[in-house]
Amino acid sequence: MSEELRLHRVGGVGSDVLLLHGFGADRMSWLANQYELSQVANVHACDLPAHGDQPALCGEVELSDIANAVIGGLESLRRSCVLVGHSLGGSIAVEVAARCPQLVSGLALLSPAGLGNGVDQDFLERFPDLSDRDPALAMLRRLVVRPRLIAPSVADRLLQHLAQPAIRPALRTIARKLVQVDVSLQPHLAAVVASSVPRLVIWGEQDGINQIHRAKLAEFGGQVVSLPETGHLPHIESSKAVNDALTNFLNIVGEKR
């Protein structure tokens, strides 16, 4: 079920960083962050399976299969990385860090699935079946506090992606796994908590898709940054604050290496 994951180097010097996007997004969702991060790190991004340019995996895909693809990509770098993961990408980052700690020098998680109050099931179930612009735009605007941040062209691009062969069924499968991630991720969260890996969690205080769960975050440990007037896309909605927090974190991780 493995599929080679292509890493795209953005640029920069310093510690290696891999950006892992959220469910239904792609590597382009980090455009507001890549330049700033490349000032302090060697930045890479990727499309997760069934997202962007990355083909869907065959069969009944588990989140561990996506983690396997990321592990393969990291192994191709031959050095450890700071993983920056949003939502789905955050849960994948946690699993990779738990299973292959030698590949991960730091974890920066944005609204990570598995650490909140649970990803909105209605959103997950309806997302793969979107077929018209207006419902797609309305769904995407649920992700943010300021709807104008999501232009109609974003919905058009999403619908083009969903129309590709094998994408809808693949996303339906991933969505089902995300509904269960609060349970399935627990062993990996425990392994990370027991480790010494540096960690940062960033969350929008008005996230309506995966609400902040402060007790879970306290148990997870590390630095927590909560952002007011911010929804489920903090790296887009509050990009400056996120870039500042990530830059500071990367500098700290770099000093420890």
Image (cartoon, rainbow, N blue to C red):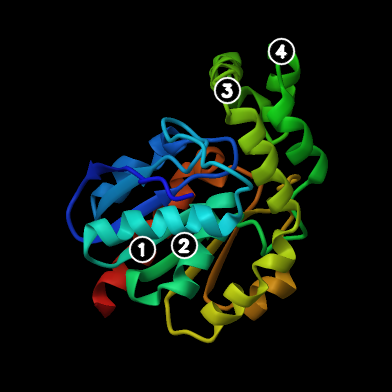
Q: Which residue, as the protein is rendered here, is positioned at the far right?
A: 122
Q: Residue at x 69, y 52 (%)?
A: 178
Q: Residues within 10 Å of mark 1 (few under 14, many from 20)?
A: many
Q: Residue at x 56, y 20 (%)?
A: 154
Label drawn at residue 132: 4
In this view, the residue in front, 3 or 182, is: 3
Q: Given contact means CB atoms under 8 Å apart, are the residues at marks 1 and 2 in contact?
A: yes
Pointer 3 residue: 158
Pointer 1 residue: 82
Q: Residue at x 46, y 62 (%)?
A: 108
- Of marks 3 and 1, the one in the foreground: 3
Q: Residues within 10 Å of mark 4 (few under 14, many from 20)?
A: few
- The picture places residue 173, in percent across and down from the top left corner, at 68, 43
Q: In terms of secondary structure, where does tag 3 sit?
A: helix
Of the residues shown, which amino acid type is indicated by label 1?
Val
Q: Given contact means CB atoms under 8 Å apart, are the residues at marks 1 and 4 in contact?
A: no
Q: Quadrant of residue 150?
A: top right
In this rendering, position of residue 80 left or right of residue 234? left
- The picture places residue 111, in percent across and down from the top left corner, at 61, 54
In this rendering, position of residue 167 left or right of residue 241? right
> Counting residues from the N terminus, which is met first, the one under dot 4 or under dot 2?
2
Q: In terms of secondary structure, where does tag 4 sit?
A: loop
- Of marks 1 and 4, the one in the foreground: 4
Mark 1 and mark 4: span between their CA atoms? 38 Å
Of the residues shown, which amino acid type is indicated by label 4?
Asp
Q: Residue at x 70, y 44 (%)?
A: 175
Pointer 2 residue: 108
Q: In terms of secondary structure, where does tag 1 sit?
A: strand
